[in-house]
Amino acid sequence: MMRRHAKSDSSRSQVTNTRRARVLALSLSVILAVVATSRGGDPECSNHGVFANGQCTCDPGYCGPICQYSNANCNNHGNCTFTGGCVCAPNYAGLHCELCATNYYFYPICRYCLSTTTCNGHGSCNAQGFCNCSPGYAGANCNRCKPGYQGYPNCLPCANNPSGDMNGNGVENIGDIDAFVLALVNPAAHQSTYPAVPLLRGDLNCDGALNGLDIAGFVEILTGF
Ligand SMILES: [Ca+2]
Ligand SMILES: [Ca+2]
């Protein structure tokens, strides 16, 4: 009995040692992999590539004979080249992709805008690459008439030249809200307060009447939306 026990203990011990060896081997391989990764590449390749057969194979995003260039040299808006230049993405330009290409605006966003297409020929591109619509036009792409205008693409002023200037001071702004609301709810009071401002100036949807249907146009004039 004693000998059988001893044999059994010995074989258990062997199994345990084998497991330990396997765990150790696995741990070592993990450690070696981590070390290799953290080292980042061969020194001959600026630590950004692998040196073999007399030349460097650079990591993604690195270039040059010894991987000394990177996409960071291109402001990360293009790919570096073997000679240290940049091949910029289509919306970027400059030796280091530090500019927007023609017809792109608002570096580093570099948004595309072309007045004849993006703004439908009824506006111009602003510094942010959005459309500033010509008078009488509205919409992100100047693809419709502003309230008070009709007949896209011509967008001529409607009868009575409607506008949001319901207090008659020459500008359209939040100062017109009270006057516009007064014109809607108590036209006679509006006329006595602002005798120089015809009620139909508020006919922003151009249907020949001033009523609730003109509110959306009034809000758009004040907010731009
Ligand atoms: Ca006004
Ligand atoms: Ca109306």
Image (cartoon, helix red, strand yellow):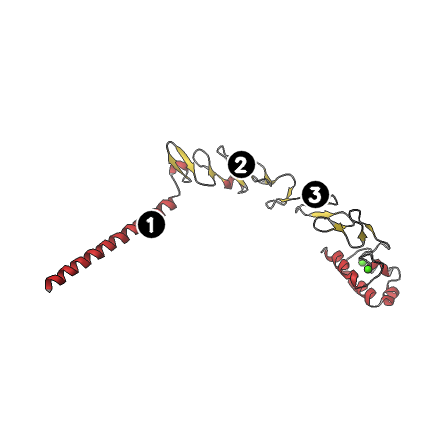
Q: Amino acid at mark 1?
A: Val
In this rendering, the count of numbered labels is 3
Q: Are marks 3 and 1 in contact (CB under 8 Å)?
A: no
Disc 1 to disc 2: CB gap under 8 Å: no
115 or 177, which is in the foreground?
115
Residue pointed to by mark 1: 30
Compared across the picture, whether 167 is left or right of 103 comes to right
Q: Quadrant of residue 212?
A: bottom right
Q: How far separated are the C-alphas under marks 2 and 3?
A: 29 Å
- Indicate which disc, 2 or 3, sits on the residue closer to the N terminus: 2
Which quarter of the rendered picture does the N terminus lie within?
Answer: bottom left
Ligand 1 location (quadrant): bottom right
| Dot in front, 1 or 2 | 1
Q: Residue placed at 25% from the left, 55% from the top?
A: 19
| Residue at screen point 21% across, 56% down | 15
Instruction: Tell which circle, 3 or 1, labels the residue nearer the N-terminal end.
Output: 1
The amino acid beneath tag 2 is Cys
Where residue 98 appears, as percent x and y from the top left, is 58, 40
Q: Which residue is mark 2?
A: 86
Q: Residue at x 87, y 60 (%)?
A: 198
Depth check, front residue: 167 or 90? 90
Tell me the SS state at disc 1.
helix
- Image quarter where the C terminus lies is bottom right
Q: In the depicted view, which residue is nearer to us: 183 or 3?
A: 3
Question: Residue tagged by mark 3?
Answer: 117
Q: Helix or strand or loop: what does disc 2 sit on?
A: strand
Where's residue 130, x and y in %?
68, 47
Q: Report the Cα–Cα distance between label 1 and label 2.
A: 37 Å
* Other-residue count near label 3 (Cα within 10 Å), few / some / many at <14 / 14–19 / ≥20: few
